[in-house]
Amino acid sequence: MTADPSLLPLGELTEALATRAVSAVEVLEACLTRIRAHDPAVHAFLRLTEERARKTAQESDARRAQGQARSPLDGVPLALKDIFCERGVETSCASKILMGYVPPYDATVVERLHAAGAVLVGKLNMDEFAMGSSTENSAFGPTRNPWDLSRTPGGSSGGSAAAVSARFVPGALGTDTGGSIRQPAALTGCVGLKPTYGRVSRYGVVAFASSLDQVGPFAQDVKGCAHLLSAIAGRDERDQTSSARAVPDYAKALGRGVSGLRIGIPPEFFGEGLEAEVEASVRACIAELQKQGAQIVPVSLPHAPFAIATYYVVATAEASSNLARFDGVRFGLRAQGAGSLGELYGRSRDQGFGAEVKRRIMLGTYALSSGYYDAYYLRAQKVRALIQRDFARAFAEVDCILTPTTPTTAFKLGEKSDNPLAMYLDDVYTVPVNLAGLPAMSLPCGLSKEGLPIGVQLIGKSFDEETLFAAAFAYERATTHHTRAPALG
Amino acid sequence: MPIADFEPVIGLEVHAQLLTQTKIFCGCSTSFGQEPNTQVCPVCLGLPGSLPSLNRTAVEFAVRAGKALGCRIQDRSVFSRKNYFYPDLPKGYQISQFELPICLGGEVTVPLDGGGTKSFALTRIHLEEDAGKNVHGEGGSEVDLNRAGTPLIEIVGEPVLRSADEASEYLKALRLVLVYLGVNDGNLEEGSFRCDANVSVRKRGADKLGTRVELKNINSFRFIRQAIDFEIARQVELLESGGRVVQETRLFDNEKGVTRSMRSKEEANDYRYFPEPDLPPLVLTREFIDSVKLPAWLPLTAAAELEKNGVPAADARTISADQALVTLAFDVLAEIRKADPAADAKWTANALLGELARALNDKAIDLAHPKFTAAQVAEVSALQAKGTISSTAARTVLAELFRTGASPAQIVADKGLAQVSDTGALEAVVDAILAKNPSQIESYKAGKKNLLAFFVGQAMKELKGKGNPAELNKLLKAKLGE
């Protein structure tokens, strides 16, 4: 057995736990040791729940000893983006307005992870209310990219990506509204999956943009993501947008291979702004899949260039409404000294929200306002329908679509902070997928000359995560990108 | 120009709480009068991360109301968010329906005093959630969210009412239908049935509507008339003195009987409605819509049926104002008709509006848990029809039956209410009376025919009131040579 069980990728760790080559307690302690050693520099975690985690790990070991493991995840240490409500554990969304807020209930995915026997070790940093692409919009300060501490891990699930990339935990959950799982996964060299809209319950996940938000897993390996998705997916009566479709055992799809698989390549995703190194790695990935028997087919997604504009109307409109409940009345920060109700609202929200959140609330409020609704919100919905149609047409020809995940590798902290539009454009390849509600995965496909990870994105048909897992696993097995770890201290 | 030269135009918006056990988007109880903030959960508190799940019964109730009011039930409707800030609104938005409501069209039909009915068109009915309540006390303001998330239907009327009286009658008729349907308790005071009125005036004959004012806080039928009448007079006076009506929301002050400005159009919220992304469109199948059943009788159909069966219009309307009375009336009638298929409903109506109403007035009985059965009431009718008891005695039996549920025959026996109809027994009494009053016989024969009543009275006295009056009349007339 390897000396440090925290270094095992999730897919292998589940086997080591099953054969009892390692115990849950050993794995947990190894993770905590690593976190203590390196998280002060990375700042992936906002808080640890060590005592709870130890108790859960011991219970898991007891189950394993009785041969009563609940699932492959039994005893696996995991961490959660601070957007998931966990009963009794502060859930802040990295916002000042929710600091100290302790939810009285568990999100459905948290319940499901408990039911699977997973060991939850803490809450991870993020952009405030999941609004951002660098984790710099956290009220607790930024997370750093384990591959280069002067760079961002991406966002908004930057803490989740950094924690998995740094081998603090073998798996984590994030949310993806416009790329918030895939972009940080790409920039930190992890596998990250945004499932089909409706595949995973959003109940207990603090909402950013309800029609786009989706929960998904991070892991070092494809198999790990498959186990995580199998555990959290499925209908939840408390989320009426969740799908009743049966949940397959995604791990079983891994060995299917790519022979005969038709993979679409849209030229719109290989144009201006794409770094040459990124393109080269992605093209190499295409060549590898082709070598394994995949059929490469050009497809067109002509409305994709309008996705960013569309997204920033739809997402901000929904956000402006979703964030109305943070008013200082029932929970979270309440400004002192307000002389009227209006002042209480104004001051609490002014003091509690960061600049990017305020910007998006204002954008969204404007888009929904009387007299502007048709020109913005309604128009955006029409474009959204066109983008969905583009994908539907493409998927008549192919089984999945392959693109770069991001146009560039990880950027420096502060590099785009003063230019929100430049920051928004980092999600140019991921956002169309959310607008169409489709599943998509980012997986590592190389390192730049500077030693920074590069990600490739696979986009699937609605509810066809299995094809993504099969293609990703075939690629992963033939390459070693996923085994490269950042050198920390 | 006098007030009569102006035509008021009124449209009502009614919010009716649905009588579901649980709230519209969560499993919390809807029971009224509990300790503040005890009927709450993450969903109705609007806690971060919570999501709404639609209550199927609330949908069924809305469809029931829509069917009863003749609306077009929509197979696809969409929930929307109505955004505004207020402490009693935990999410900062109300989940309502906006562009695509669950019911379109329909009408409220009102009975007219002189007979007949008049119908007033509805625009729509939509489903939405109620807000909580702000409680203002000495130590500051507090919020009770027990009511937050109670299901409501909003019934929006077209501006087709032309007087305060019409508005009041419309409201009464609508309330009664909802109560009949079991979807609302019709309680204006507790606010489970609330009304806002849009009021404008225009010169008679004018096509264009005047500027409208929305009146809020009207919680009784008397207040709706007062509020509207005050508002009509205020607007007419304003126009008469060369002023203009300002579009605004006004509150009715029920102590002073006046309306006062609450907020102007400029201060009105921009609600920024947009489709609720947390709830898929509400799609109703034909099977579901068909499965929603209406009660056997609605107020107007019940009144019409009673009238058709011989009950005077006013009495029929009185009975139809109470669903329990209607049910009982038709149950009793059905029992009576088992013996007498041609029986009309007059006797039944009289029994219900007479002795039953008296017992209800005295709070001696509870119609929700009656001690008597319809069959027993019909038995009293049969005893009277057979001549076993007089109509006076029948009333006594009914009074006792309603209060105790004792068997009518037993009551008759216990109270000695049976009439003497036996010809032999009656003849003996009649003969004795005639023998004692020869002079009266003379007078009668001389033409004082009203002395017949005297003889009947004497005989009745002798029989302690239990003589069958019809038989006595017949016998006396025969003996007196007619």
Image (cartoon, coloured by chain):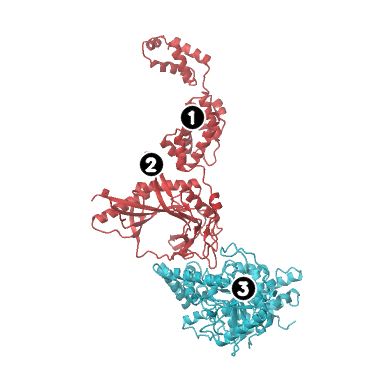
Chain colours: A cyan, B red
Indicate the amino acid at tag 3. Asp
Q: Quadrant of residue A63?
A: bottom right
Indicate the amino acid at tag 2. Leu
**Picture coordinates of residue A146, whole percent (x, y):** 60, 85
Whether residue A395 can be seen here: yes
The C terminus of chain A lies in which quarter of the figure? Answer: bottom right
Q: Secondary structure at mark 3?
A: loop
**Picture coordinates of residue B153, whole percent (x, y):** 47, 54
B90 or A303: nearer the viewer: A303
Find out whether the residues at labels 3 and 1 contact each other: C-beta distance under 8 Å: no
Point 26% across, 56% down: residue: B238
Mark 3 Cα-neighbour bin, 10 Å: few <14, some 14–19, many ≥20 = some
Q: Secondary structure at mark 2?
A: loop
A19 or A395: nearer the viewer: A395
Say which residue label 2 marks. B112
Find out whether the residues at labels 2 and 3 contact each other: C-beta distance under 8 Å: no
Q: Quadrant of residue A205?
A: bottom right
